[in-house]
Amino acid sequence: MRARVQKTGRFRARYVPRRKHCAFCVDKSEKIDYKAPDKLRRYISDRGRIEPRRKTGTCAKHQRVLALAIKRARHLALLPYVAAHIHDMGGVGLSG
């Protein structure tokens, strides 16, 4: 039985968000590698910050590995640290 919310005289079904699944758990062959900035690009915001688990849907185990890979890629200048560099380069990661 669905819960209903009354809005302006009509009944409408309540929004229930779909559960996000970890992309690394679903595809077991995919490995998190700091040398692949194009794969890591999805997990960095437009401001250059690492996206949280609640937004990307990664599990805790893979989020820890992902954060470490992003930090290593930043250290080797494969990924930017700050938003100004993203704006100057026209995107996150190497433009090729």
Image: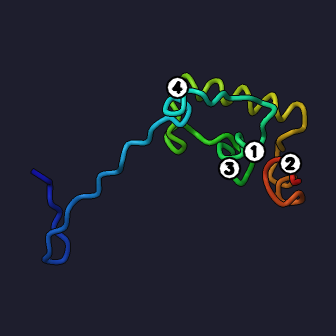
Gap in angstroms between the C-alphas marked 1 and 2 = 8 Å
- Give the residue type that dot 1 points to: Asp
Secondary structure at badge 2 equals: loop
Horizontal arrangement in the rendering, residue 59 relative to residue 81 (left or right): left
- Given this view, does label 2 or label 3 mark the residue nearer the observer? 2
Color style of the picture: rainbow
- Give the residue type that dot 3 points to: Ser
Query: Considering only order in the chain, which callout, 1 or 4, is on the residue closer to the N terminus?
Result: 1
Secondary structure at badge 1 equals: helix
- Asked which quadrant contains residue 34, the reply is top right
Query: Considering only order in the chain, which callout, 2 or 1, is on the residue closer to the N terminus?
Result: 1
Gap in angstroms between the C-alphas marked 4 and 2 = 27 Å
- The circle on residue 72 is none
- The circle on residue 60 is 4
Q: Residue at x 81, y 28 (%)?
A: 72
Q: Of residues 11 and 21, which is closer to you in this image?
A: 21
- The circle on residue 94 is 2
- The circle on residue 45 is 3
- Give the residue type that dot 2 points to: Leu
